[in-house]
Amino acid sequence: MHIVGTQGRIDIEIPFNIPPDRETRTFLTAGGDPPASPDTATRVFSPVDQYTIQASLFAQAILDDTAVPVPVTDAVANMKVVEAILG
């Protein structure tokens, strides 16, 4: 996935459904107006099973009677984006 802005760009190696046994990297490139070369910073994320983490955090919030990690308003906003795309 490539996200391009006015100050640089972000590249995400595996943006969705990362295999749980594989690390992933993001690259932030900024600066370097021609003729200079831009700088790129790399972040490496250790392998995790994001769906297990999501389910565990949700279950813990239910068991502890605390707020869920992602509010319902986030889901509503996601659906508005999907509806706008399919529009």
Image (spheres, helix red, strand yellow):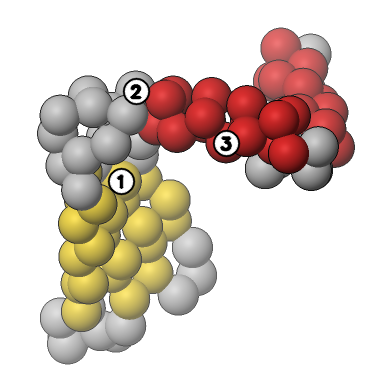
- The residue beneath circle 1 is 12
Please identify the residue farthest to the top as the structure is shown: 86
Measured along the vertical axis of the image, is residue 82 above or below residue 3? above
**Residue pictured at 62% horizontal, 26% vertical:** 59
**Mark 1 or mark 3, which is nearer the start of the sequence?**
1
Foreground: 59 or 26? 59
Hey, what amino acid is under mark 2?
Asn
x, y percent for residue 18: 28, 28
- The residue beneath circle 2 is 17
Comparing labels 2 and 1, the label whose residue is closer to the camera: 2
* Quadrant including the C terminus: top right
Hey, what amino acid is under mark 3?
Leu
| Mark carried by residue 57 | 3
Q: How crowded is mark 3: few (under 14 residues within 10 Å), some or many (20 or more)?
A: some
Comparing labels 3 and 1, the label whose residue is closer to the camera: 3
Query: Are discs 2 and 3 less than 8 Å apart at CB?
Result: no
| Mark carried by residue 27 | none
The answer to whether one can see residue 29 in this image is: yes
Numbered disc 2: secondary structure: loop
Left/right of residue 23 with respect to residue 52 in the rendered view: left
Foreground: 73 or 34? 73
**Mark 3 or mark 2, which is nearer the start of the sequence?**
2
The answer to whether one can see residue 77 in this image is: no
**Residue pictured at 28% horizontal, 69% vertical:** 29
Hey, what amino acid is under mark 1?
Ile
Q: How crowded is mark 1: few (under 14 residues within 10 Å), some or many (20 or more)?
A: some
